[in-house]
Amino acid sequence: NAGVTQTPKFRILKIGQSMTLQCTQDMNHNYMYWYRQDPGMGLKLIYYSVGAGITDKGEVPNGYNVSRSTTEDFPLRLELAAPSQTSVYFCASRHPMVPNQPQHFGDGTRLSIL
Amino acid sequence: QKEVEQNSGPLSVPEGAIASLNCTYSDRGSQSFFWYRQYSGKSPELIMFIYSNGDKEDGRFTAQLNKASQYVSLLIRDSQPSDSATYLCAVNPNAGGTSYGKLTFGQGTILTVHP
């Protein structure tokens, strides 16, 4: 059982480039989330989705876009990379119907923008 | 004002001692509280969750919740060097209805257990 899979694990971008961070889960979870974690800080919510076709902004959505065409996949898009987006990005998923269920995290994508 | 606050530490305890990690939150309507452990360069992993006032024990770990004081803590008994990590407190807020499981994280407390 793979759980939550993120690709790539590492990436270096130049300022102004674009890229998509991939996230897929095989647990049939409707709820999915994207977080970023800056050094020495906690996680901040970028976007979340409660099911295919439904997405909403989190705390720090500027500079990012998401889509959710299937239950399994929740890609995060950076259109014009900026140095402030250098961070570690975590994708997570959760079962919606079981109370107090924890979020399951992927291994993260470490992104540097130079 | 930060919504979830933790002392960033580092907190250093000797092996075998009790480590006490604290967290306060601002949203009085918060429903669920989670403690995650994060090793350097790794993703967060769940240690415990609690949603009722009082204590909840799981092995060497005890979570304590006091909703009146808006305070949640994690005690680690018989601390081991392998417990050295960053501990993240996360809160499921009450967004005036369903919060869709969204979590607000504190900045984390670095714990070091020395032999």
Image (cartoon, grey):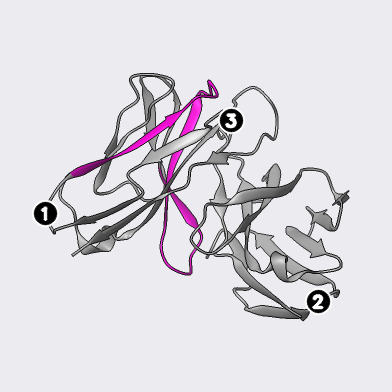
Q: Is residue B114 above or below residue B34?
A: below
Q: Which residue is mark 1?
A: A16
Rendering coords of residue B92 (x, y %): 62, 44
Q: Is residue A12 above or below residue A71?
A: below
Left or right: A83 with respect to A59? left
Q: Comparing marks 2 and 3, which lies closer to the viewer?
A: 2
Residue B98: numbered disc: 3
Same chain shared by disc 3 and disc 1:
no
User: How would you classify the magenta stretch by its main secondary structure?
Assistant: strand
Quadrant in the picture for residue B108: bottom right
Amino acid type, callout 1: Gly
Rendering coords of residue B44 (x, y %): 57, 52
Rendering coords of residue B88 (x, y %): 61, 59
Q: Comparing marks 1 and 2, which lies closer to the viewer?
A: 2
Whether residue A78 is visible: no
Q: Is residue A32 magenta?
A: yes
Q: Is residue A82 magenta?
A: no
Q: Which residue is mark 2?
A: B15
